[in-house]
Amino acid sequence: MKIIQIGTGGWGKNHVRILSKLGVLSAICDIDEERGRRYGREYSVNYYSSLDSLLGSEEFDAAFVVTPTSTHLQITKILLDAKKHVFVEKPLTYKSQDGEELVRLAEKNKVILTCGYIERFNPAVKIVKRMVKERRHGDLILLEFHRENRMPLHIKDVGIINDTSVHDIDTANWLFDETPSVVFAKAGRIKHEHEDFASIMLGYKNDKVAIITSNWIAPKKVRRFSAVCTEAIISSDFITQEITIENSDKSESLENEKQEPLQLEIKSFLNAIEGKGTHIVTAKQAVNVTEIAEAALLSSQKGVPIYLELK
Ligand SMILES: NC(=O)c1ccc[n+]([C@@H]2O[C@H](COP(=O)([O-])OP(=O)(O)OC[C@H]3O[C@@H](n4cnc5c(N)ncnc54)[C@H](O)[C@@H]3O)[C@@H](O)[C@H]2O)c1
């Protein structure tokens, strides 16, 4: 299998490392020539500074798009038109309408389109998902997410909701196994061009709720979530991947092996291309996340709940 990658910046350098280790990286493209050259040489693959020149010279099966959000639509359209399978980093697109267009194009050309909602591949989330599905601690009634970290000012194209909260929106949908029917949010801006702190409440069936708190201001990296169930509270940390289960009598910490979620996510996409039927985030699920993010921004601007009918 031959895989190319577009965008080798802060996050994309991890994909090239993993794809090279898996022996499938065949070429890279970055408009920053110096960066493209550096990784091209490091991983002994051809490098290009434009997608057009890469398309004119390389044969490949699939592509990773790890460029800023504002470029995802244009780059992904070109790749889907060329009938390539595409993995696009999150969020799929800035506007849900654009995402719908990509879904239709991928369906028409019979190729896989997926989006980098990485936390589904985090071993801790996988374990909690299994517990919830098997109702091991009763019914899940509330999810709470905290994602905090002082961020440099380099992300200029989107605010925290589209960049960061979307991870937790997808994880909430994944753990509840449905999409919310109502969104209420408050967000504001202190240092960045767009909103840099947000609290989002998602309402699911039977009054179940996910509360998502994200900010780029607080000077401490926090990435935690908890799942409140009728018989226990399950708490976890996306970074350490540790899980604690508490009820009135005891607090139990699980022994689970830490693994790199990005590697698991990439392998899942490669397996899906080979028809091995592993789990991937569907493009439609990624569009739903964008619609929920849009509703959160609108709710915050208007100060009202936004009702959704997602499919
Ligand atoms: N899943 C995660 O946990 C996670 C974490 C960080 C970033 N991301 C996502 O990854 C994507 C990239 O983020 P980043 O932090 O690496 O950004 P970045 O700005 O550090 O890197 C982007 C790279 O893309 C290149 N680029 C820009 N436009 C291009 C184009 N038209 N053609 C080719 N190359 C182009 C830039 O030169 C740069 O090297 C974003 O969608 C972001 O949301 C995901």
Image (cartoon, grey):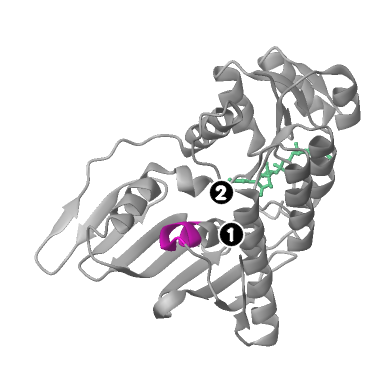
**Residue at 57 percent of width and 77 percent of height:** 183
Q: Is residue 163 visible?
A: yes
Whether the residue carrying mark 1 lies under 8 Å from ligand 1 is answered with no
Q: Residue furthest toward the top? A: 44
| x and y, in percent, of residue 232 in the image | 22, 65
Q: Label for residue 108?
A: none
- The residue lying at 82 percent from left, 43 percent from top is 77
Residue for badge 1:
166
Q: Is mark 2 within 8 Å of ligand 1?
A: yes
Secondary structure predominantly adopted by residues drawn in magenta:
helix
* Residue range corresponding to the magenta coloring: 171-177
Estimate the x, y position of residue 204 in percent, counting from the top left. Answer: 47, 74
Q: Amino acid at mark 2?
A: Tyr
Residue 173 among magenta residues = yes
Mark 1 in CB contact with mark 2 (< 8 angstroms): yes
Q: In the displayed structure, does residue 307 sit left or right of residue 268?
A: right
Regarding residue 148, the answer to whether it shows in the image is no
Q: Label 2: few (<14), some or many (≥20) within 10 Å?
A: many
Q: Position of residue 266 (x, y in %)?
A: 55, 33
Q: Is residue 268 above or below residue 22?
A: below
